[in-house]
Image (cartoon, helix red, strand yellow):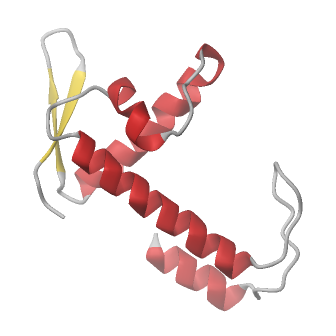
């Protein structure tokens, strides 16, 4: 994540007009990148803390999202939760076990 942020900062000037897919256009790309990355790191920390006991992907929504997840966005929320879980797993910070019903359970290994 950090390498991509550095590359974007190097290749794209901070004063470029950003035209996001949602919300209003803005200036200040570098500040926005920093806020997004910092927010993801805070979410990853909350997620890891939440996994002191094994949980399914849908059980960790509270650690990642500030609002309740409605049925209309359940698929997107699950995908985002799985992306965060896989990221931490790839960092060697989570374990994943599949039970006899094929359900995946994630747990923190206590590493930071």
- The percent position of residue 38, horizontal first and vertical second, equals 49, 68
Residue at position x 57%, y 75% from top?
Answer: 34
The relative height of residue 13 versus residue 87 in the rendered view (above or below) is below
- How many numbered circles are shown? 0
- Where is residue 96 shown, x and y percent of the image? 17, 36
Q: Is residue 1 above or below residue 89?
A: below
- Say whether residue 44 is left or right of residue 76: left
Residue occupying the point 13% across, 60% down: 111
- In this rendering, is residue 31 above or below 49? below
Residue at horizontal 23%, vertical 28%?
55
Choose between 87 and 109: the one closer to the eye: 109
Q: Going by the image, does 44 lie left or right of 3? A: left
Image-based side of 76 in relation to 54, left or right: right
Which part of the image, by quadrant, shows the C terminus?
A: bottom left
Residue 7 rendering spot, x and y as whole percentages: 58, 83
Q: Which residue is drawn at the image coordinates 69% and 87% (left, top)?
A: 11
Where residue 5 sits in the image (x, y, percent)? 55, 77
Query: Could you say which quadrant of the image residue 30 lies in?
Result: bottom right
Residue 54: quarter of image: top left
């Amino acid at each position: 994540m950090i390498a991509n942020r550095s590359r974007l900062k190097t290749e794209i000037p901070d004063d470029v007009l950003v035209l996001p897919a949602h919300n209003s256009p803005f200036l200040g790309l570098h500040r926005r990148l920093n806020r997004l990355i910092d927010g993801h790191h805070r979410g990853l920390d909350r997620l890891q803390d939440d996994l002191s006991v094994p949980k399914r992907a849908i059980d960790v929504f509270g650690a990642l999202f500030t609002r309740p997840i409605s049925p209309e966005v359940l698929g997107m929320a699950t995908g985002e939760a799985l992306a965060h879980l896989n990221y931490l797993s790839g960092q060697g910070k989570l374990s994943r076990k599949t039970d006899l019903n094929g359900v995946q359970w994630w747990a923190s290994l206590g590493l930071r």
